[in-house]
Image (spheres, rainbow, N blue to C red):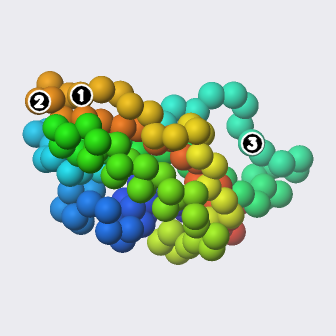
Amino acid sequence: MLTLKDIRQYISALGIAEDAHVYIGKLDGKKQKSIGIYHRKADGPAQVALGGLSCTSYGVKRISLLVHWNRDVSESEEVAQRLYRRLLQENSLTVGDTEIRCLLLQVPEPVDVGTDESGVFEYVIWVDFVYQREEEEN
């Protein structure tokens, strides 16, 4: 099973932000130069093969990555672009103990969502992790 904790470890290992600045869930008083990992709401029908879960070989974890960087728009955008390119360049990936079949970037580039209440620039990247389901999930 693929968890937010596993994805957090993967994003942290990319070395774009310090480990202590990569977080899941809500972080009050988030620090500059941080990346947040959140579940993204799904829509549409469940993706289950004919025959039910026992015949379904993959799952999808829909994620929103929030790049919360600093008050310099150029630097913030560059960091968001760097993270986006790293995701695009993956060609073989295991996150935690889970084999990732593919990463589907759901936006054509990092999306500028403006600044937070402190003037820190933020960018969002939507990515779907398509992963190999484990036997006990079936």
Q: Position of residue 92 (x, y in %)?
A: 63, 73
State the residue at coordinates (42%, 55%): 83
Look at label 2 and name its amino acid: Ser
Residue 67: image quadrant is top left
Look at label 3 and name its amino acid: Gln
Residue 135: image quadrant is bottom right
- Which structural element holds mark 1? strand
Q: Position of residue 87 (x, y in %)?
A: 52, 58
Which residue in the structure is indicated by mark 3? 47
Mark 1 surroundings within 10 Å by alpha-carbon count, few (fewer than 14), some (14 through 19), many (20 or more): some
In this rendering, would 109 be left or right of 77? right
- Which structural element holds mark 3? loop
- How many labels, in total? 3
In this rendering, would 46 be left or right of 66? right
Q: Position of residue 3 (x, y in %)?
A: 46, 57
Which residue in the structure is indicated by mark 1? 115
Which residue in the structure is indicated by mark 2? 118
Look at label 1 and name its amino acid: Thr
Mark 2 surroundings within 10 Å by alpha-carbon count, few (fewer than 14), some (14 through 19), many (20 or more): few
